Image (spheres, rainbow, N blue to C red):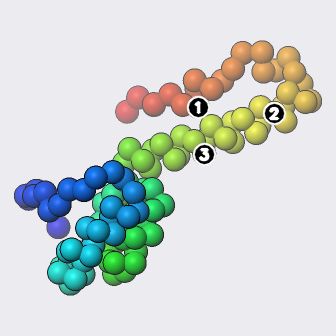
């Protein structure tokens, strides 16, 4: 399936759970039967509300947020490894390798 057209359905104030609930109270019944997939910010309040109102929808998370989470995980592993290595061999980490792990490889 390809997205061929876009249309703003609704706009509300703020980025809260309550705002999203207002949207679904106004449009949720009509959407439950027609929405096949949902792409949204991966904020937990959004996920919780959308799961409640569109339980059968397929989740599609955007590339930006997936890569952001991946880079955070890689950085956390790097930090943990560096902490352990520093205890055993402090001279080994005089020059950081952080930029190597976070650099985008050439394709």
Q: Which residue is mark 1?
A: 101
Relative to 64, residue 58 above or below: below
Answer with left or right where residue 73 lies relative to residue 84: left
* Residue drawn 33% across the image and 69% down it: 21
* Nearest to N terminus: mark 3 or mark 2: 3
Q: Quadrant of residue 5?
A: bottom left
Q: Which of 89/46 is in front?
A: 46
* Nearest to N terminus: mark 2 or mark 1: 2
Which image quadrant: the N terminus?
bottom left
Q: Position of residue 65 (x, y in %)?
A: 42, 47
Q: Are marks 2 and 1 in contact (CB under 8 Å)?
A: no
Where disc 1 sits, the SS reads helix
Answer with left or right where residue 99 lies relative to residue 3: right
* Residue 69 shows in this picture: yes
Q: Residues within 10 Å of mark 3 (few under 14, many from 20)?
A: few
* Residue drawn 77% across the image and 37% down it: 81
Q: Position of residue 68 (x, y in %)?
A: 48, 43
Q: Residues within 10 Å of mark 1 (few under 14, many from 20)?
A: few
Where disc 3 sits, the SS reads helix
Indicate which label's residue lies in the foreground, 3 or 1. Answer: 3
Relative to 48, residue 6 above or below: above
Q: Which residue is mark 3?
A: 73
Which labelled disc corresponds to residue 83? 2
Q: Quadrant of residue 3?
A: bottom left
For the residues labelled 3 and 1, the Cα–Cα distance comes to 11 Å
Q: Are marks 3 and 1 in contact (CB under 8 Å)?
A: no
* Residue drawn 85% across the image and 17% down it: 91
């Amino acid at each position: 399936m390809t997205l061929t057209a876009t249309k703003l359905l609704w706009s509300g104030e703020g980025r809260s759970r309550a705002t999203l609930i207002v949207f679904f109270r106004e449009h949720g019944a009509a959407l439950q039967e027609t929405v096949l997939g949902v792409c949204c910010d991966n904020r937990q309040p959004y996920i919780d509300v959308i799961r409640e109102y569109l339980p059968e929808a397929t989740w599609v998370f955007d590339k930006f947020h997936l890569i952001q989470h991946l880079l955070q995980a890689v950085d956390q592993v790097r930090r943990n490894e560096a902490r352990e290595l520093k205890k055993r061999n402090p001279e080994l980490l005089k020059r950081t390798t952080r930029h190597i792990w976070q650099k985008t490889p050439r394709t």
